[in-house]
Amino acid sequence: MTTSLFNTTLTHSHAEEPGYLRSDKAMKTRGRSFYFASKFLNSETSQKAARLYQFCRTIDDIADQFDSKKRAQDELNLTIAELTGEAPPSDYTSDLYLLADETGLDLRAAVELVKGCRSDLFGEVAIDDVEGLIRYCYQVAGTVGIMMCSVLGVSNPRAFPYAVDLGIAMQITNIIRDITEDAESGRRYLPSTLVGNLSCDEITAPTQKTLATISTAVKSLADLADSYYASGQAGICFLPRSAQQSIAIAATIYRQIGVKVRNNTAESLAHRVVIPRTEKFFLAGRALYRNFFDRKSFQPPVHNSSLHKPICHRPGTNPLS
C-alpha cells in the first residue's frame, strides 16, 4: 500500500530496539504529521499510539517492501491467522495483543486492516468506483481510527463511526496526494467512474487531457473527503479532553494537504505536497480555537448513516447504514 497513513520504513528485522523507542522513532522519521500531533498527548497515551503506529506500519511495509507479492501474501495470511488465534503470535502481533489487553482494542479491526493491505497484492490495482474506494479506505485507515479510539481511552461505541470517518477522510487525502507515486507502483486508486480506464503509465506521463481528467477527479474526491472530515471532526467530542486537541490538530493538518492538492493538482503530481512546520503550528492554533472556542453546540452529534452505506455491518461502522 504505497498510499498510506503510515509513511515510514520498518520491517520485522528491525527488532533490536525496545518497542516504544522503535515505534516513536518510526513516527518521528517518516510519519511527521502524526508525530507532531502526538506531542499534544500525554506521555502514556503517546507511547500506546506509537505502538499501534508501529504495528500498522509493519503491515504496510510487508505489502509494499517484501521481495515478492507471493511472499507478502503469505506473510499477511499468517498475520491474520495470528490475530484470529489460529497461529501463535509473532513479535509484532504479540505487542498488539498486549496493547489490546491494556486498552480493549478490537482485533477485528486489525484483521480488516491486514485484509485491506493484502488486497493491494492481487495484480494491478484499479479501483472501480467511489463505493469501492470507501471500502478500501475503511480497511486501511478507518480501522486505524477504531483502534485509536481504544488507545485514547474511548469505550463509547457511538464514537467509533466518527473515528472511521476521520480515517477514511485522511486516506482519501493521501490518495489524491500520492497519485504519481502510486501509479509508479502499478496502483491507481482514482475510481474508474471518475477517470475511465486511465492507466498508470498515462498518470506518470500525463497529457493536458489526462491532467484535466485527474484534476476533475481530485476535486471530486477532495469534496468527498471533506464530508468525511466534517463527520470525523464532529465526533471529536467523544474523546477525552486530553486527546481532543491532538486529533483535532492531525485532522486539520491532513485536511490542509487536500486543500493544497485540490488547488494545484498539476504541481502535486510532480512534487509531493507537504506541510511546513511553521504552517503546522498555525494550523494547530486554528484547530485548537475551533475545537474549544468556536463550537455551536456541545451536544453529541447524530452520525450520518449514509456515509457508511458501502461499509455497513463491518466493525465500528454505523449499524443503521
Image (cartoon, rainbow, N blue to C red):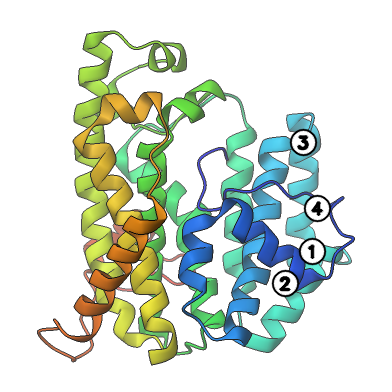
Determine which residue is flagged by label 4: 78
Q: Are marks 1 and 2 in contact (CB under 8 Å)?
A: yes
Distance from Cα at disc 3 to Cα at disc 1: 16 Å
User: How far is the residue under mark 1 from the one under mark 2?
Assistant: 7 Å
Question: Can you identify the residue that label 2 sits on?
Answer: 96
N-terminal label among 4 and 2? 4
> Which residue, as the protein is rendered here, is positioned at the far front?
278
Q: Secondary structure at mark 3?
A: loop
Which tag, 2 or 3, sits closer to the chain's start? Answer: 3
Tell how many labels.
Answer: 4
Mark 4 and mark 3: Cα distance apart in space: 14 Å
Q: Position of residue 311 (x, y in %)?
A: 39, 58
Residue 92, x across and y down, in percent: 79, 63
Q: Residue at x 68, y 80 (%)?
A: 100
Residue shown at the point (22%, 27%) measured from the top left? 215
Q: Which residue is mark 3?
A: 66
**Which marked residue is nearer to the observer: mark 1 or mark 4?**
1
**Left or right for 321, reference 109:** left
Mark 4 residue type: Leu
Among the two numbered marks 3 and 1 on one chain, the one whose residue lies closer to the N terminus: 3
The x, y position of residue 154, in whole percent, is 47, 87
**Mark 4 nearby-residue class (10 Å; few <14, some 14–19, many ≥20):** some
Mark 1: few/some/many CA within 10 Å (<14, 14-19, 20+): many
Label located before the other in sequence (1 or 4): 4
Label 2 sits on a secondary structure element that is: helix
Residue kind at label 2, given as amino acid type: Leu
Would you place residue 293 above or below residue 268 in this image?
below
